[in-house]
Amino acid sequence: MRNNNQNMEKIIWLDGDLVEMSKTKLQSLNRGDKNAKGLFETIRVEKGNVFFLKEHLDRLGKSAKHFKINLPDIKWKTIINQVLETNSLSESIVRLKIVLASEKIQNPEMPDCDEPTIIVACEEYTPPSNDEYARGWSLKTCDTSFAPLLAAHKLLELCFFYDARRAARFDQMDDSIILDSDGHVSETSICSLLFFYHDSWFAPDSDYQLPGITSDKTINYLEKYGAEVIRRPTSVMDLLCSDAVFVLNSLIGVMPVCEIDREKVYDIDPVLANFLRKKLFSCSV
């Protein structure tokens, strides 16, 4: 863990230089800020080990190509190490954020952006406790609006997801289930979903969901051990009637779900979640 003063100035990598965050003109690096325009990836780092960096950069690159933004071929691992070391986080569990910023990202007629602003930032991350993993998360269905058209891309200014999770937290739940325009489950505000029913694994399939790196890796592990994972349109009732439900993302790994809309999920399975999480992170968390 960090031994330094917790209030030390955050240093970020900005277009080739290590600079103090407070001395930049950046308004925000947080999703949900309408003034923060850009693509981003959030990655877990543990004692310098950057989990699934290639996959995150591949996803970032596909979104950049969609928006006609150039993703430079730079030495990402070297840059990440510099940021970790400068912030005294080389031995910590870290939330790493890579941002590809462009003010023109939302303009459908924008020209190619050959020189976007590139930001690499990090902060110490405290994973959920063992008790929280054992208890599982409670989910709330977001029934006031549907997944946005650009849900397949991690855009900073998609505040829909921020508001959805805030609504869940207001009701003392952990996250919101997002539905697409057909009423099918897409994902949660920050996670992918997997569920188990009658000896079979399923993943919600929707045109309005982010390609999940952690869920794909977990599916690979399940298939390696002989399980079949079926992707199909999924209703909230499918989740409620399943034997076990899990949420997954790059930071938390695999978290069991204990209830949905105040209804208990049939069987929370922290043992299986713990096994899959250890496979992902190659250590206990």
Image (cartoon, rainbow, N blue to C red):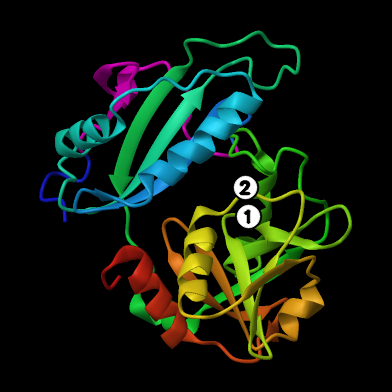
271 to 145, vertically: above or below: below
Q: Residue at the right extreme?
A: 182
Magenta segment range? Answer: 8-32
Residue located at (35% from left, 71% from top): 279
Rendered image: mark on residue 162: 2
Taking depth in this image into account, of 285 and 231 the one nearest to the observer is: 231
Taking depth in this image into account, of 249 and 75 the one nearest to the observer is: 75
Residue 184 position, x and y percent, is 82, 63
Rendered image: mark on residue 189: 1
Residue 15 position, x and y percent, is 35, 16
Q: Which mark is in front, 1 or 2?
A: 1
Q: Is residue 167 visible?
A: no
Q: Amino acid at mark 1?
A: Ser
Counting residues from the start of the chain, the first of labels 1 and 2 encountered is: 2
Residue located at (22% from left, 31% from top): 78
Q: Is residue 112 visible?
A: yes
Horizontally, is 224 left or right of 66 in the view?
A: left
Rendered image: mark on residue 12: none
Taking depth in this image into account, of 87 and 65 the one nearest to the observer is: 65
Is mark 1 in CB contact (under 8 Å) with mark 2?
Answer: yes
Residue 39 position, x and y percent, is 54, 31
Q: Residue 153 sits in which quadrant?
A: top right
Q: Give the SS element for disc 2.
A: helix
Q: CA distance from mark 1 to mark 2?
A: 7 Å
Q: Give the SS element for disc 1.
A: loop
Residue located at (26% from left, 70% from top): 283
